[in-house]
Image (cartoon, helix red, strand yellow):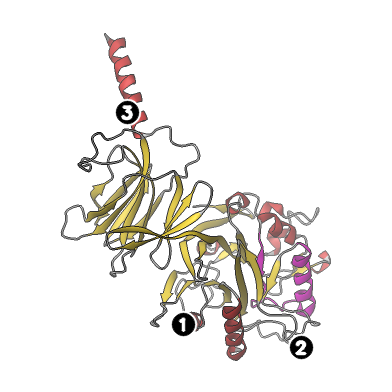
């Protein structure tokens, strides 16, 4: 009897797991996340979505749902966000099916379920749209305009907008660029010792690079200049790192390096020129500094890359260079506002998207300062899409700024990503952030932003570790 009962229990458990979709793992990215929604907290873990109010559970997804992803956005533009779930469940319909449907099927299918937050309800939410079924899709996201982006199995992204009482196809194909931006590459000499004998620094990023492989575009801030003569390698306060560091940066998958920062002139024009050349030889674009022979009226200060049919402009500015100066125009400065505005307007006119690297803020402060707030508004005013901030060596907030103008322009600003790698010992200096986002280009040329987030990394024994 015991063996029979065990067999029955095992069979029931197997059927239960099968019903719930225990074998769905192949090729599906199951998201795990936590975010605020309508005064509550949504936690998505182990394929279940749970809503908490004041740490008390008020709602959870059905036991036989497998929730692949959860996103939130004001899709109907009423000033309040909606919650969207990408769900795997059996059957095209729930308890209530249309009268013309005689029998609900029992196949596992994907659905998008949309909820509106309602404080008066015990559950805190009310269902407003439940798709009957979907063709197999890879994932969903929302952009800064409240549109829903659906990524199909073949990688094609379509855009859907809320109209009247449901989602309607807006664009059957949009161009997207996935972008990861890293913080300060601050190379103290103690980090370099291990690699100096063989001039190999791959250990910096060997554990990080697998997370960058899915990105279309990767950047970092080169806080220390590079030199070809290893005898010139030096530490704070006048940094210089071996040229071979650029090999590790290339291996990480970096496409663009910002070189405009307060240490840009640590080795004078020699350091600037060596740095530009080292990255250029490896096919990496530099932005923000210029060699002595470069006339910035001829060699453009705005640098451009075209990625996935999207033309992207890059600019970089720093608050200063530690009191050092050079002949000619060597470093782009925030304080040269007339020139900066001219470059921003040029970039806006010529590119689909504009990304600015800003070296600003107060060192070791987790709060933004007045100068950052001032230039953030200026960047918004002149049509910048994304600002990547560095210099404080600690992580600061990120936010989406919106203009009051009719065009509803938005600028995503990461005020400080902190350190990508450094030998600074303080906990908040060893912990940095990598900005992750997707640029979305609609066919009319407008660019919106989707999937913005901040991934945590740490410097551990001279290499960068991905935390989450």
Residue extent of the magenta highlight: 254-282
Task: Indicate yes or no whether the magenta region holds residue 102.
Answer: no
Q: Secondary structure at mark 3?
A: helix
Q: CA distance from mark 2 to mark 3?
A: 74 Å
| Residue topped by disc 3 | 16
The x and y percentages for residue 230 are 82, 64
Front label number (3 vs 1): 3
- SS for dot 1: helix
Task: Determine whether label 3 and label 1 are within 8 Å by CB.
Answer: no
Residue 277 falls within the magenta-colored stretch = yes
Quadrant of the rendered image containing residue 20: top left
Q: Is residue 221 left or right of residue 172?
A: right
Nearer the N terminus, badge 1 or badge 2? 2
Q: Residue at the bottom extreme?
A: 338
Q: Nearer the viewer, residue 410 or 244?
A: 410
State left or right for residue 265 relative to residue 20. right
Res 319 seen here? no
Is residue 382 something that shows in the picture? Answer: yes
Q: CA distance from mark 3 to mark 1?
A: 55 Å
Q: Residue at x 75, y 71 (%)?
A: 276
How many numbered discs, if any? 3
Residue occupied by mark 2: 327
User: 306 left or right of 167?
Assistant: right
Mark 3 crowd level (few <14, some 14–19, many ≥20, 10 Å Cα): few
Q: Which mark is drawn over residue 377?
A: 1
Mark 2 neighbour class, 10 Å CA radius: few under 14, some 14 to 19, many 20 or more? few
């Amino acid at each position: 009897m015991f063996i029979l009962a065990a067999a029955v229990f095992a069979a029931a458990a197997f059927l239960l797991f099968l019903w719930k979709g225990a074998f769905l793992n192949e090729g599906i990215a199951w998201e795990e996340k936590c975010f605020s929604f309508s005064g509550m907290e949504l936690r998505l873990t182990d394929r279940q979505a749970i809503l908490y109010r004041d740490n008390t559970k008020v709602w959870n997804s059905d036991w036989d749902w497998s929730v692949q992803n959860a996103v939130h956005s004001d899709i109907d533009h009423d000033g309040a966000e909606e919650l969207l779930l990408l769900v795997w469940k059996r059957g095209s319909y729930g308890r209530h099916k249309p009268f013309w449907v005689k029998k609900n099927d029992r196949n596992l299918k994907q659905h998008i379920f949309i909820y509106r937050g309602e404080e008066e309800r015990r559950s805190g939410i009310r269902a407003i749209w439940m798709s009957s079924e979907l063709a197999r899709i890879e994932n969903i996201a929302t952009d800064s305009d409240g549109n829903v982006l659906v990524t199909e199995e073949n990688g094609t992204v379509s855009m859907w907008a809320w109209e009247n009482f449901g989602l309607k196809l807006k664009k059957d194909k949009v161009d997207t660029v996935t972008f990861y931006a890293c913080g300060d590459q601050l190379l103290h000499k103690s980090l370099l010792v291990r690699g100096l004998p063989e001039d190999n620094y791959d250990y910096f990023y060997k554990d990080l690079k697998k997370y960058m492989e899915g990105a279309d575009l990767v950047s970092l801030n080169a806080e220390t200049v590079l030199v070809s003569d290893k005898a010139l390698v030096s530490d704070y306060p006048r940094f210089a790192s071996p040229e071979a560091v650029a090999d590790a940066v290339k291996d990480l998958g970096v496409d663009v390096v910002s070189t405009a920062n307060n240490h840009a002139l640590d080795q004078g024009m020699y350091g600037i020129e060596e740095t530009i050349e080292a990255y250029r030889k490896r096919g990496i674009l530099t932005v923000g500094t210029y060699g002595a022979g470069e006339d910035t009226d001829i060699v453009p200060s705005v640098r451009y890359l075209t990625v996935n049919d999207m033309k992207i402009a890059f600019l970089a500015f720093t608050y200063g260079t530690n009191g050092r100066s050079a002949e000619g125009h060597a470093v782009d400065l925030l304080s040269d506002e007339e020139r900066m505005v001219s470059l921003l307007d040029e970039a806006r006119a010529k590119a689909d998207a504009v990304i600015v690297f800003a070296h600003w803020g107060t060192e070791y402060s987790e709060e933004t300062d007045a100068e950052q707030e001032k230039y953030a508004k200026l960047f918004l005013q002149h049509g910048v899409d994304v600002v990547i901030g560095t210099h404080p060596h600690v992580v600061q907030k990120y936010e989406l700024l919106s203009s009051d103008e009719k065009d509803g322009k938005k600028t995503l600003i990461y005020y400080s990503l902190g350190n990508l790698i450094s030998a600074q010992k303080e906990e908040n200096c060893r912990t940095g952030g990598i900005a992750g986002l997707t640029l979305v280009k609609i066919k009319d040329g407008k660019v919106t932003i989707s999937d913005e987030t901040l991934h945590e990394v740490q410097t551990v024994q001279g290499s960068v570790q991905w935390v989450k």
